[in-house]
Image (tube, rainbow, N blue to C red):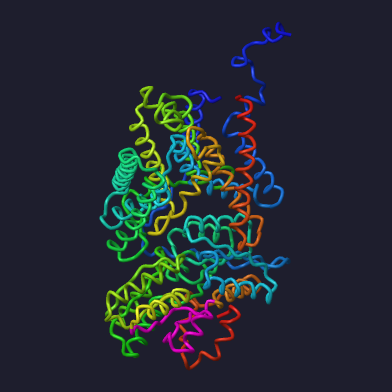
Amino acid sequence: MTAAIQAQPDERVAKKSLTDRLVVRPEIGALLGAVLVFVFFSVVTGQFLSPLGVATWLDDSSTLGIMAVVVALLMVGGEFDLSAGVMTASTSLVTAILATQAGWNVWLALLASLAFALGVGAFNGWLVMKTGLPSFIVTLGSFLALQGLNLGVTRLVTNTVQVSGMRSTSGYESAGGLFASTFDVGGTEFQSSIIWWIVVTAIAAWLLVRTRFGNWIFAVGGSQVSARSVGVPVVRTKILLFMGTALGAWLVGSINILRFASVQANQGIGLEFQYIIAAVIGGCLLTGGFGSAVGAAIGALIFGMARQGIVFAQWNSDWFMLFLGVMLLAAVLVNNAFRRRAERVRR
Amino acid sequence: MFTFKKLAGVAAIAAAGLILSACSGPSADNSKSSSGSSPSAAAPSTGGPLKVAVVTHGSAGDAFWNVVKNGAEQASKDLNVGVDYFSDGDPGNQARLIDNAVAQKVGGLVVSMANPQALQTSIQNAVKAGIPVVTINSGEDFSAQFGAIAHVGQSEGLAGQGAGQRLKAAGKTKLLCVIHEAGNIGQNQRCDGAKQTFGNVTTLQVDISNPTDAQARIRGALQSDPSIDAVLALNSQVAARAVAAAKEASSKAQVATFDLNADVVAAIKDGSILFAVDQQQYEQGYLPIVFLKLYKENGNTIGGGKPVQTGPGFVDKTNIDTIAPYAQRGTR
């Protein structure tokens, strides 16, 4: 008997089966959930698979997806950013007010709002690291502050609660061409935000799994103390992550303002939780140290497909949130079952 | 597993696709007098009941929009027209709901435009796809320009002016105007209208989704400025909070409001609310379905390019008894 045991290779270098290798990936649960949701609505509704239908739910997923991906990186790093939702409106407002009220060229206004976003992101990160308070609390504060700032400044400058008139500013067409154009696939218009979403996901995935910075993210999220003791620059990493969510919010804010040509002072409130749930569906843990950018993008896709699919299915809209909640819960449960299996495999 | 090379490849292909595909940016607004593309006359209806999608900006569960929804549903029953009702307060999401209805090839579209610019592209796409659009409630100035066949609503500025006039006639001197939706331009127009005819008006911002907080803020405003002798609420839920707040602050302020509900009816009867400006939003749900049916089956249009006004009607002690039962059943 003992000889038989010794003949087996060490379990740490044993070859794992393909299913086992797949199952340990954080995004596999989300992928399965996405396939389920996709098949379900394709069967139940007539228009879900039509080119226009696909364009609609991809459009819905795209801006959510950009934010879900950057928020996922931050969550892997062990932090939350509750100001991310309202930040998408703040950046839109800065751009719109500078362009329409101060008469700036749109490109300059976009640069100014980028600087503003990165500043707020850096401030969030710096405050979290400086005080040692949970980022949940710190960014809740900045979320409320930004919400007030959005309304206060907008009313002060324009005497109303919407900033519009972007279409007649200088540089609108060229900036819109980059951020908010449409591209034609077989006669159907798709929003370019879908491309942005794919690009942001690709960059974030590469950053997370192929670079030293990605290792730092996992390290600071897994255990800050251990990370610091092996020489990971914890403070810099976390501040950069907060600036990352702000950068994402600026991108989404720019896409929105150039596409819709107007922005409301109360936009974006409550979206931060959608970003978090999309990231969690994609396999991120609330405790940090585990997750994936591709998973978060798929989580956003599930969210978008469910949101538009419910409309295509023409279910009574009174129950809309119930459907959405149940569907997302189901996706998270599927995920969880997979993660258990994954942990067994790893052991 | 991804490799960096593959990833860079994917990104490059995506970027190239963006450049190479027939890429069209948003169009700028160069001419101020862009005339709306007039929708071509409807083809004779081709059997099957008409299907209409109603897409509004009201939050789900809002009392005002519930009446609009009831109107649309009653019209659906009376006229044998299929009606689907959807709402989202975020302009981007509302635009996507319109795109969704277009993808579903609905026979008609009813849209409330709290934020016209954000909905412009989606509505014009619907018009381009040959779907007749009726706009409701707000955005009357843009309705024809976007190619809608009619607008049904109440001019907010006029209604605000009417409210201001009535309060002045009642001998009030200082008015607090309570705004409850931060992003709603119509509410600002109402307060501005009241300012034009009344004069001394301050605005207060509250959050409709948190009634406790709304009441506390109105109470605080009344306590900190005892010279306020009138409060103008812009919705019936806020009106009930304002009445309670005035009582708690033992302020002399009397409340007037926009919109009716059972509470407001009771308050008008017992005199704690002076009057209500009623925009009869049931008609904003019901009439567009009628218009779309007529347009579809007989090529009729209505309003002659001008908004069809559903208000302002004023409800006070003199006519409350007639209207009370209707408010009770959710149609006023």
Q: Where residue A257 sits: x, y (%)?
A: 40, 52
Q: Over which residues does the magenta segment extend?
A: B252-281
Screen quadrant of the C terminus of chain A:
top right
Q: Nearer the viewer, residue B299 or B16?
A: B16
Is B277 situated above or below A294? below
- Residue at 31%, 78% (x, y): give it: B195
Q: Where residue A16 sits: x, y (%)?
A: 64, 20
- Residue at 62%, 30% (x, y): give it: A342
Q: Residue furthest front?
A: A2
Q: Nearer the viewer, residue A148 or A251?
A: A148
Magenta stretch encompasses residue B258: yes
Q: Residue furthest bottom?
A: B318
- Residue at 64%, 75% (x, y): give it: B75
Screen quadrant of the N terminus of chain A:
top right
Q: Nearer the viewer, residue A67 or B36?
A: A67
Magenta stretch encompasses residue A157: no
Is B280 situated above or below B66? below
Q: Where residue B233 sits: x, y (%)?
A: 41, 76
Image side of residue B200 versus residue A292, left or right: left
Q: Nearer the viewer, residue B34 or A320?
A: A320
Q: Where residue B31 sits: x, y (%)?
A: 36, 60
